[in-house]
Image (cartoon, grey):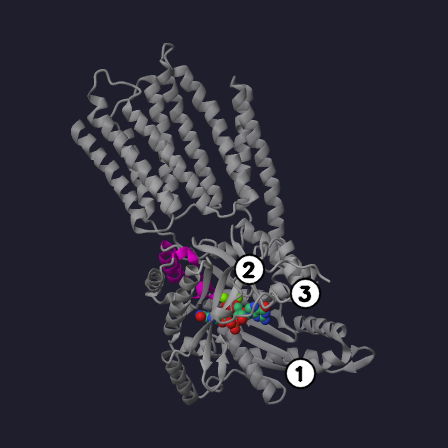
Amino acid sequence: MPWLDGWLQAGIYALAALLAALRPLLVPRARLFWSLLAASLTTRAVAFAAFLFHVRRLDPVPYPSVADAFWLLSAVLLVAALVVLARESSAHPTVGIMLDALTGGLVVAAAAAVFLYAPLLELLPSGAGSDVVVVNLAYPSLDVAIAAAFIGVLASARWRVRGPLLWIAVGVLAHAVLDSVFVYQAAAGTFRPGTPLSALSALASTVLAAAAWVRPQLERRDNPEIEPGTGIVLPVAFAVLGWALLVYAALTPVSTAAVALTAAAVAVALVRTGWSYHQSRALAEQRILARTDEVTGLANRRALLEALEDRVRHPDRGGIGLLALDIDDFRALNEAVGHELADTVLEVVARRMRESTRAVDLVARLAADDFVVMLPGVSPQEAEEAAERVRASLRRPLEIAGGHHVITTSVGLAMFPTDGTDADDLLHKAELALGDAQQHGPGLRRFEPGRHTTAGDRRRQVERLQDGIRARELELHYQPIIDLDAGGVVAVEALVRWNHPERGLLAPDEFLPLAETAGLMREVFGTVLHQSTRQLAAWHANDHELGLAINVSVTDLLDPDLPDQVADALAVAGLRGTHLVLELTEEVFLAEPKRAAAALARLWDHEVGLTIDDYGTGYSSLSYLRDLESLQGLKLDRGFVAGLDGDPRGQAIVASTLELAYSLDLEVVAEGIETPAVHRHLWELGCPLGQGYLFSRPVPADEVPLDATFPVVDEA
Ligand code: C2E
Ligand code: MG
Ligand code: MG
């Protein structure tokens, strides 16, 4: 039934066009791409309708016809859409991306030159008019352009083909293949309408349109490592393809253009491989540096939390004892013998701790003289025995500067899962127990619940905070974020303060933990959101086109109303989502990755992106975070930034973190810039943005130095 067949297909094309067109009308993000895609699909629908209702009824059926004109226009629009998508997928294309796109494009063009053009030209009847030749070559050329543009998109997206991009990939690929088959048939004069070929083509349009409504998913990976592998695999695959083509071209007579294209593809692929190798080495180096303690060579906090988190995720493997250990009077020792000798003491302590524990135990150093031992698979009694063994080994006299010294230690013990069920909590409990041990004379203490604050105190505090929020005692201070290259203020971070009538201006650390556990974060967030967006709108009205960063906690993000709340606040203030960025710490994704990702996707629909706050203190990996579509950047923790001053190891970590961030197309804000020397270092390393007391402390809105510039100054 050709009429049914035709109508059905026309309906499918029209439906696909409609499906795609609704997206830019309803969702602000990536409007240009979806508009172009919708235009392309609409043109396709028109092309099909023109063929069905007009061209097909002519006798003889002309080729090329007006339908071909629409068909080709649709392909041009698709290329435009893909170019826009490639640009949107990557704000700062890196060398790697551009090399990938170039190699891929060259391989596709070379393959087309060898396999597509030559046979097409042969197929043409000798007397074919120039219009036939042009159209016949236009089809495959546009297909090559689509494929090349699409490889650009894939490279920009770092070859992470999932979610909407997967659908787009399937749709584009199907279109390219089907169109090539079509042009073969048209050239050979074997094309017949109404075959499965046309039905598949309509289906491909639908797949493309459906991509508009697919949600990206954040996948939890078992192996939370950064995988540098992908950077190598694809260029190598392209290089191999290029070689194969080159060999084929050598064996068969093909045009010199094809040979030149193939050779170029191989050459670029080789350059790319070398570049990937260089980058993955830098990453591996950073991984090791970022996880070891410099003085003792032990694991650092990050490594400890990673290991702990990993164990906690598998409670079936038995309990865990966590010891927090502190050297008594270390500060006095440090002052007495000097910094260098004190470091030597720490090295000896580290060695003895390692020797007195089992191979499966993990010894880490968190700060000056704070050590932690993770004891997997122990009972509380075994944990206490292990603690005593460690303490005994440290009590053995130690020779320092000719004299003998005895070290005593205090140890706090917390058990998983009895005392805490997640890594942070467990560490906190062990530290509380350590505090107890220190207060009540040296020795070992196990964490005891209920020992630290009484319920009555807490209730009073919560009520006071509740009253404070209602009485509008929460205020915002703003700290400028500086473009390190130009020196100007590009954004501000809103930081909440509690202007307490009796206790004065309180920092967030002094009341947010309470708000968090007492369920008051929603009100805090609402206040911050409304005050800051109103303030930003006022700045914009005064010609200060700033961006705004606000901090979001786990509970905030998991509040199902948050995305709408944010969208409403933006609308009320007359701001766009691109003006706002949310700062999240990595713990958010460990707590509830699925729900967090869903909330972020809804915010991203309103163009609101996110940055990872305090990057470097957490322990989730970027390979996992980068699945978040709306991830715009990192805020490098001030612990790392401060380390830049004269410390080559700190410099290496910052440099490789910057490189990693660039290769993932992320912005970096360096936090806690306090000295001109650190400022200068960051600038030399190419860090784009910075924030810190050197430029301005967090201050009330009217004191923000909006017009100031902060040039890099030479060290005196
Ligand atoms: P953060 O988001 O990492 O904010 C940066 C903190 O570093 C601020 O502390 C800021 O005053 C401080 N800082 C900035 N420059 C320097 C510097 O050069 N040197 C030093 N030593 N410190 C610097 P603040 O205001 O006490 O805020 C502490 C944390 O409280 C914030 O860390 C953020 O995680 C949280 N916070 C602040 N406001 C809010 C809020 O509205 N909502 C939520 N959920 N959390 C907030
Ligand atoms: Mg922040
Ligand atoms: Mg921070």
Q: Residue at x 43, y 30 (%)?
A: 144
* Nearest to the observer: residue 98 or residue 702: 702
On screen, residue 251 versus residue 521, left or right, reads: right
On screen, residue 629 versus residue 617, left or right, reads: left
Tell me the residue that label 1 is attached to: 328
Q: Is residue 603 magenta?
A: yes
Question: Given the image, on which type of amino acid does mark 2 rest?
Answer: Ile
| Residue 294: assigned label | 3
Question: Given the image, on which type of amino acid does mark 1 rest?
Answer: Asp
Percent x, y for residue 356? Answer: 66, 74
Q: How much space separates mark 2 and mark 1, taking CA atoms?
A: 42 Å
Residue 224 visible: no
Q: Residue at x 43, y 53 (%)?
A: 629
Q: In this picture, is 14 found above or below 472?
A: above
3 or 1: tag closer to the N-terminus: 3
2 or 1: tag closer to the N-terminus: 1
Circle nearer the viewer, 2 or 3: 2
Q: In this picture, is 25 found above or below 680?
A: above
Tell me the residue that label 2 is attached to: 482
Question: Given the image, on which type of amino acid does mark 3 rest?
Answer: Glu
Q: Main secondary structure of the magenta part?
A: helix
Percent x, y for residue 334? Answer: 72, 78
Q: Is residue 45 magenta?
A: no
Residues rendered magenta in the picture: 576-605
Quarter holding the N terminus?
A: top left
